[in-house]
Structure formats: structure tokens, C-alpha cells
Image (cartoon, rainbow, N blue to C red):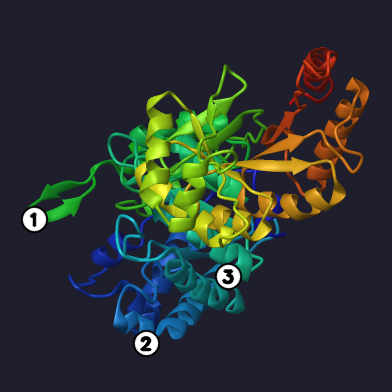
Amino acid sequence: MNVRELLGKRMLFFDGGMGSMLQKNGMGAGEIPELLNLTNAALIEKIHTEYLEAGANIITTNTFGANPLKSEEIGESLDMIIAAAIGIARKAVNSFQSEGNPRFVAFDIGPCGKLLEPLGDLSFDDCYDAFAKIAKTAEKCGADLVIIETMSDTLEAKAAVLAVKENTSLPIFCTMTFDESYKTLTGGDVKVMSAIMEGLGVDCVGINCGLGPAQIGEMMTDLAEISSIPIMAQPNAGLPQIENGKTVYNVLPKQFADECEHMAKLGASVLGGCCGTTPDHIRSLVEKCKNYKPIVEEKNITVVASYSKTVVLGKGPVIVGERINPTGKKKFKEALRNGDIDYILNEAFAQRDAGAHILDVNVGLPEIDEAAMMETIVYELQSIMPIPLQIDTTNMEAMERALRIYNGKPMVNSVNGKQESMDQVFPLIKKYGGAVVALTIDEDGIPQTVEKRVEIAGKIITEAAKYGIPKKDIVIDVLTMTISSEPEGARITLESLRKVREIYGV
């Protein structure tokens, strides 16, 4: 039985801290933990075994810092370190396998150690390449799943998720870390994280490190309310304290388990520990929470997100600013031809100040490289603007390049009932996530009847489901016609709206 088959059906337990256990077992200051896979495999196996004896189902490889961007010393031995780490964990796990309580090896991917642009100087592509290299090696060496953990930037987490998705078939668990204001480094909250990671198709999403079980428990309450996929938590053993020049954690095993029980009651699928936790913490956690049943329910919430802000559709009017669009705008066309990015950004600021909730981005002009310009504008906008974006293009290369580097879950404008349109757009929505605007047009053009528009809406929803795209990520546009030339246009639109809502629940 693989971990995907168990996830969400029974409680699963990760191990606890590796670094704190290594320090407890004599690792000196300045030593690189990942090199111990090569120089002291017995110690790593001993720690894995202690966690397995405590009841952990999933053992995390000692590879948190095994990234070619982190240090030259690791980079030179990277493949050997990964192979050794997975081999050590596999050896420990094999000693504890049983049909009723299977154990798994999770390959641990931590942050790359550098800030991505615009906060730092690391490009998205270079970050992706580093994660892709280690992900390929991890699958080749026999990991059962990947845990992408302690991420503080959703864009870095996205690079890691895409690297694993595109280069392996391994299940992906992803956890992010939050500060005491319950925000990531880039200002996002758990709702932002959930929207992005669920859109990207991770198997399990959650929170780890940074805070103790009491604080993480509060955020898990929010996560349980909005997430449609399994959720997880790996708190520290409390908030870090400095005693005699050393970092210590003061939440003891029983208190840790008691405070984590709240998360089990919420329906968490996976629990474990992070910094400061020991096999005793995991033993208490397993004993306290092993009989709780995970809760995984589809949440019918249509949401888009930037790196720091979510917008929920359906609860009230949502204003989409559409002035970043060359149609009928002479000055905007000139700005695109001349590469005048400031002019375009000023349009964005003006719409934000006027109350727009989402900004549409359309740079389609025949004489420019639309794909390159779209990527540039999306990058520049998300560098300065917390408002979610709507990617508006019929150019599939432009759409994919924008979706790939977008730090959030965007709107996508648009798809329609033509088979060619659905065949092109839906694979991109499935891969990158997004709420897609669906126009009730097909090969015969704009329907003149309510029944035909409703039929096309159903066709689009059904086709999206084949790709695993839920109804909540489909936003139906039943179209409006000019009443002066189409006297029945308003009635047809309003009746189509009512029927689409009633029949399809979108």
C-alpha cells in the first residue's frame, strides 16, 4: 500500500526534529548535518529507529540542506548524500514494516538558502533547476514521497512543487512556516498558501516549524475551514528560548501531544514534530491522536490569490480592473511597442487606488512578442502589487509563461465551449492552478437562446472534470449583448445566469 492510498483515510505520523537530535547526540557547531549520511550513517539510522519505535509512520531523510545552491561542499557530493540518506532511512523502515502499519521514507526538501527575485537575486528558473536535480535523484534512489518543508516564500515553494511534479511521480507534501503574526516572509497567510498549493495539486498541505503547537493550532483552524485536500502540521516543541547561549524548547512531550490533539479533532490527516521535538514527543503524540479520523471535504469556495492576498468570488461584487489592455487604447499600444513598463504599472496603481480587487493583464499586440511581454508584466506587477491578477490571452505560450512564474493562484481569461479551446487551456489550469473564466460560446458562435448557453456551460464543466478541475474553479460568463441591437439580450443573459447557478452550482 502506498502513502496516497492511506492519506486522508487514517491518521499518519511523521517523525520529529533531526537537527536537535543530532545536537543531542554530539554533532558539533558548524558541522553540516547532511554530510553525516556519509561519515556517520549509524547515528542517522539510530535516530530514525528511535522515531520508528515511537510510532512514526513516515521517516524524513537527513537531506534538509542537501541542495546544490547551499554549499559547495554539499554540491560536490550531492548525489552520494541523497543516495546514502535514502538508503539509511530505507534500512530503518524495512525493519519496522508490517501489513497493518506500513512505514514510508519521505525525501526532505528544505529551502534553497537564497531569496528569489525580487526579494533576492535568485531567478525562478535557477531555483527550479536546483530542486529538479535533487527530485530526480530522490525518485531514482527509492523515496516513497517528498516533503517540501519550512518554506517561507510561496514562489520558492511553487518552484519546488513544479520541480517534483515535472520530474517524478512521487506524492508531494508541502508545509510552510509562519512568523508570530501568522504571516509568511512575503506576507501571505494560510488562506494564500492553501489556495496556491491546492491549485498546484499537492497531495497534502500544512504548517511546520517557527511556532509551537498552540500557535500552529490556531492557524490549522483556518486551514481546516478552507482546504479541500488533506492537511498536516509539524510544530516545534514550543517557541525557541535562549538559555546559557543555547536555543532550547520548553514544551514537554505530554503538553505537546495535548496541544496537538486540537489539530487531530479538526481533521488533520498528518501530524509530526519539528525543531526541539524528540522520539518522546512523537510517542506521546501517537498515543494521544492515533484514533482520530482525518476529515477531507470539498470546500466549494472559489478563490484567487496573490502572494499575500486572497479574493473570494461569490460573496459579493468583485471588481476586475481591465485597463491593462491595448484594445482601443492608443497610448497603451505605444507603451507596449516601446517597452514602457512604467506606463503600464501606473495603470495598475490607478486601478488599485480606484478599488479594483483583481487586475486583468492583456498585452496582446500583433507586432510584439506577446509571450515575453506577458511574462515581464506579470513579474513586474507581482513585484509591487498585492492584488491578484487575471491572465488574459489567447496565446497559449503567453498563458503558460505567466502561470508558471505567477506567485499566487490567478484568474485565467478565458476558455470557451470550443473543443480546441478546452484542449489547450484545461491542461494549463490543471498543471498550475487557477480559476478560469468560461465563456458560453462554441463552434457555432454566441447562442441566441438561454438553453444553448446553459448547455455550453454544462459541456465546459463536464470537460473540466475530466482533467480533475473542480466546479469551484470554473467561473461561467453567460455573455451580454448590446440591448439596442438585441432587445431580448438582457432577458437571455439574466435567465441564463439564474439557470446556470441553479443547475450547476457554480
Q: Give the CA separation, mark 1 to mark 3.
A: 37 Å
Front one among 203 and 94: 203
Residue 143, labelled with which disc?
3
Q: Is residue 126 placed above or below 487 in the rendered structure?
A: below
Q: Residue at x 65, y 41 (%)?
A: 413
Q: Residue 208, position in %: x, y? A: 40, 47
Between the C-alphas of marks 1 and 2, the distance is: 33 Å
Q: Which mark is residue 378?
A: none
User: Element under label 1?
Assistant: loop
Query: If the image is split into quadrants, where does the C terminus sit?
Result: top right
Give the answer, above or below, for where 315 lies relative to 13: above
Tell me whether the residue at label 1 lies in contact with that at label 3, contact meaning CB atoms closer than 8 angstroms: no
**Earlier-in-chain disc, 1 versus 2:** 2
User: Which is more N-terminal, label 3 or label 1?
Assistant: 3
Relative height, residue 97 to residue 473 (above, below):
below
Q: Amino acid at mark 1?
A: Gly
Closer to the N terminus: mark 2 or mark 3?
2
Mark 2 secondary-structure assignment = helix
497 or 269, which lies in front?
Answer: 497
